[in-house]
Image: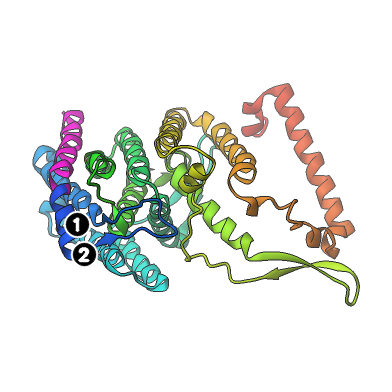
Amino acid sequence: MLITSYLAVFVGGVLLALVLTPAVRRLAVRLGAIDQPGERKIHAQPVPRLGGVAVLIAVSFAVAGAFWLIPEMRPAITSTLGAARWGVLASAVLLICAMGAIDDFGGLPARLKFLIEITAAAAVVLVAGAPEAIDFSPFSFSLRLGYVAPLLAIFFIIALTNAVNMTDGVDGVAGGISAIAALTLGTMSVAAGHVVAPVVLFALAGALVGFLPHNFRTPKVFLGDTGSLGVGFVLGAAVLIGLQRDGAWLIVPAVLALAVPLTELGLTVLRRTLRALTVERTTLPRERFVFQAGWPGLFVPDRRHIPHRLLELGLSKRWAIAALYAIGATLGGLGLAAFYEPELGPFIGLTIVAVVIYFAPRWLYHELRLIERGALLPILESRLLRSRALQATYDGAVVFVSCLATEAIVMGPAAVLSGGS
């Protein structure tokens, strides 16, 4: 019964977005919410924004219908406390959407947007709570968060909100990647025994699938900041709630399913920071290399996000989108594998990190080529690096890791993880 209801919520989201998006597009044209062509843009003609309004309205109606379809959800709205919680959650989403809409019309200062995001995320964490611990399965321990839990929850919601926004530079990327992630995470949330979070995730996935045809066809409409920020915010809040098991957040499956936007966020912050960091050669009081740091401009938009770089590498827009969808679907499948078979999680995670470390500097961003840029020269000249204490610590760490590797080869990885018992 629940599976049928979830399917109905998904289909409802698809149909609502299909019907609502043309009306929202006409409204955007009438109000003048138009994305004009520019240096950072890849479209040659003006395109209406505010498509995210249709998506989020579709999500709202699909979730509302779920209260009628799924009896288990009714206690979450019939009680005074439950109604108040939903009211706060809806207000937080509306605040993010209003911020995005204002940005679509004319723009807001980055610091003000960040403050609004903090306020909205804090409201969600206040009424929905934060995970008590982080589950690092297959390892037999969970990291208790204590008083840090609300801060980490707020940070995650804000990070994912901006991560999805950063992927929204090419038609269909943000919507498609978020839809794939929402479907994957909704499936995990169902398996984890939740009811409300899967409804939100499947409604979001359906609404995005219904929106995508309008994002590709002519005349088209963009999600805009209203949509990309709103989608990221809803996704972040739902993931925090829906991937908890016994109060612990399942971090490995969650991060794998969201690896595309989170990788975009991490690479953007890293490359902008490194771009502001230069190495200069000085001769006084002696010849040496020193770092010179400028302003990183973390909130200054550019046209160097992953979708843009794929286009610059020679891929057509269709193939770039297909590649990102394939990567998102693959990572979603790996996230499901790590959810059902936790032993695979560390291996999958390390493999993905290795792939990103290899390909990102080689094909995507020259800022990450630290050796070519000479960024290691000042570090190699530091007194700390040449100290005997550090060298002894390094030697000891190598010996310790070698012993663990030897034990793993002889006795098996399971014996090492269990402490040899």
Where is residue 361 drawn, in percent x and y?
A: 63, 46
Mark 2: amino acid: Gly
User: Which residue, given by chain and number where applicable, does mark 2 sit on?
Assistant: 32
Q: Secondary structure at mark 2?
A: loop
Residue 76 x/y as whole percent:
17, 50
Q: Quadrant of the N terminus?
A: top left
Q: Which is more toward the observer, 146 or 317?
A: 317
How many neighbours does mark 1 have within 10 angstroms: few (below 14), some (14-19), or many (20 or more)? some
Report x, y in % for residue 351: 59, 34
Q: Give SS at disc 1.
A: helix
Residue located 27% across and 44% down the image: 215
Q: What's the residue type where badge 1 is placed?
A: Trp
Q: Quadrant of the C terminus?
A: top right
Residue drawn at x 63%, y 71% is 294
Specify start and end residues of the magenta stretch as a single range.
1-21
Residue 86 disc label? 1
* Along the viewing direction, whichever of 347 and 194 lies nearer the viewer: 347
Going by the image, does 63 lie left or right of 92?
A: left
Residue in the foreground of this view, choosing between 176 and 255: 176
Q: Give the mark nearest the N terminus, 2 or 1.
A: 2
Judge from the rendering whether residue 408 lies leftward or rightward of residue 139; answer left or right.
right
Residue 4 position (above or below residue 304): above
309 displayed left or right of 46: right
Can residue 202 be seen here? no
